[in-house]
Image: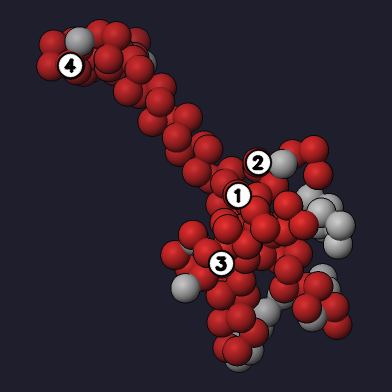
Amino acid sequence: MTKFVNITGLMIAISAVLIASQIGPVSAKEDLVSGVIVAQRTINVETKIDAYADRIFFERHPELAGSKIRPGERSLAREWQEIRQCEAVVDYIFYERHPELAGRRIQRNETYLAEEWTEIYDSVSGCQ
């Protein structure tokens, strides 16, 4: 067991030296750390966009609330995917810009917010 731990530790140390010799010790650490941060942030963003898609989909189909789309329901699956590619992305971007709204709907008198949402909509490639 001790030999395995020592060999594993040695292999990690050698790998670190090789990485450091190619891109420098500070860069190697930054690259490794930023890769983890980017991966975690991507998962978090995807999860939030999925949640927006669910909210929009179930607002349109309240009779389905709490259920999952079954394999034979292709049109519903396609609709959810279309929502996911467009409106959910727009909502994500919009509410990230306006955390003070806490996800609430834009009110009729908030035309400036509606215009901003529409501008985002027009710029998202999944909405074209």
User: Crowding at label 4, few (<14), some or many (≥20) Cα neighbours within 10 Å?
Assistant: few
* Residue 64 on image: x %, y %: 81, 80
Asked whether the viewer can see residue 18, the reply is no
| Residue position marked by numbered label 1 in the rendering | 93
Looking at the rendered structure, the secondary structure element under dot 1 is helix
Mark 2 or mark 4: whose residue is earlier in sequence: 4
Check residue 86 in the rendering and tell me which mark sits there, or answer none: 3
- Residue positioned 73% across, 52% down in the render: 112
Task: Say if 113 sits above or below 54 in the image.
Answer: above
- Residue positioned 61% across, 81% down in the render: 79
* Residue 66 on image: x %, y %: 82, 71
Q: Amino acid at mark 1?
A: Ile
Mark 4 and mark 1: Cα distance apart in space: 35 Å
- Residue positioned 86% across, 62% down in the render: 108
Image quarter hosting the N terminus: top left
Towards the viewer: 128 or 63: 128
Q: Amino acid at mark 2?
A: Arg
| Residue position marked by numbered label 4 in the rendering | 23
Mark 1 and mark 3: Cα distance apart in space: 11 Å
Mark 2 and mark 3: Cα distance apart in space: 17 Å
Mark 4 or mark 1: whose residue is earlier in sequence: 4
| Residue position marked by numbered label 2 in the rendering | 97
Residue 125 sits in quarter? bottom left
* Residue 31 on image: x %, y %: 32, 23
Looking at the rendered structure, the secondary structure element under dot 3 is loop
Marks 1 & 2, CB-CB < 8 Å contact: yes
**How many numbered circles does the render carry?**
4
